[in-house]
Image (tube, rainbow, N blue to C red):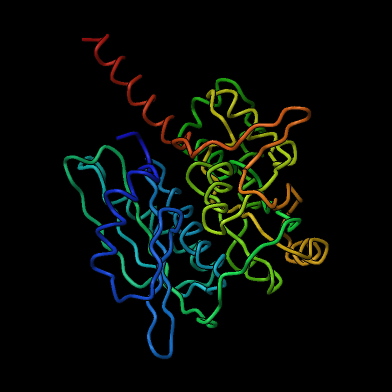
Amino acid sequence: MRTGRVTQTIWNRSVKKQIQKVNRNSTGKTAWEESSSELVSDDKDFVWSSASVSGKAPAQVKYAVIKSAGDLAAKRVRPTAVSVQILFPESSDEQELKDIMRILTEICEETGLAIACVQAESAEYVLRTVIQITAVGVKENSKQQMKKWFPGTEIILCGYTGLEGTLRLVEEAEADLRTRFTPSFIEKTKRCKESLILPEQILKLPEEAKSRQCGDGGVLCGLWELAEAEKIGFEIDFSKLALKQETVEICEFFQLNPYLLTSAGSYLVLTEHGEETLESLKNAGVPAVRIGFVKEQNARTLVNGEETRYLDRPAPDELSRWWKERALLVAHRVNSNE
């Protein structure tokens, strides 16, 4: 299989059918485009969401927290706690665990999350640290129905395309970047983390709006998932997809497509009241811009000047491709030195 998340086709064929056999009497939803799950009881609707990251920098843990907790917030569920599982290479030491826990504590304090449990182990088959975060919350309005979105409904992008991936690249490959960029550029890029949208901010959306967090596969994958989940077609003005200049330059350096670069901490919003929603986001300190609208047909089109094309099925995330190519390069260097 390809690097990264399995394709929608494989998931439907090999996962969905098996889940449906077990969950015949369940009220929960399971779908490739859904990263959260619900368990409905008589009086409460428990919702949880999982996200995983891998890398060598301990700071990766905060992106898994932002992604898992943010997926709950996008469903209007206030996340309350996280559980953590960490899988280390055998070469790791205790200091790496301490660094991860320090950063985990910082982001959980910032987002008001309790740490329910932490499991950590090492294994000989692990090449780089893998961290999985599961966030949990209780849905207050468990009877909320799926809304039909009519043509003309506006689509808003909150945050910046590929920003999460940009920050992770800086943390993983700062030495490489310093061969091209000045120290001040590197430090300025690190400060861009302040532009990631936190769960508390997205919870302040107007009640009628519907949001979805971008993640693996970047904003283009996020748009595909939005269309699948809401059963809509749309037209997107490609030039409106907000990019930090730091993302542009770092993606050029590594020859990556920023629109396919993991983007946790940015959200797509559907709304029938664009001005009200933009004002609400502005008051919450969220950078946001209109990028398109829902169409009557199911076609998903991207318009860039005079060029119009259809949105492709999600491609592998660019950060996953970067890791794969980096591993091949290291292996080539080792073989060349033998």
The image quadrant where one finds the C terminus is top left
Towards the viewer: 16 or 222: 16
Towards the viewer: 320 or 75: 75
Residue drawn where x is 29% and y is 64% of the image: 20
Decide if residue 170 is on the left or right side of residue 86.
right
The image quadrant where one finds the N terminus is top left
Q: Position of residue 317 (x, y in %)?
A: 46, 37
Is 294 placed above or below 299 here? below
Q: Position of residue 93 (x, y in %)?
A: 26, 46
Is 330 placed above or below 5 here? above
Towards the viewer: 225 or 277: 225
Q: Position of residue 205 (x, y in %)?
A: 69, 68
Residue drawn where x is 33% and y is 21% of the image: 328
- What residue occupies the far left of the structure in this picture? 124
Decide if residue 1 is on the left or right side of residue 193.
left
Residue drawn where x is 57% and y is 72% of the image: 76
The image quadrant that residue 239 belongs to is top right
- What residue occupies the far front of the structure in this picture? 297
Is 185 placed above or below 265 here? above
Towards the viewer: 87 or 277: 277
Decide if residue 21 is on the left or right side of residue 73.
left
Decide if residue 25 is on the left or right side of residue 112.
left
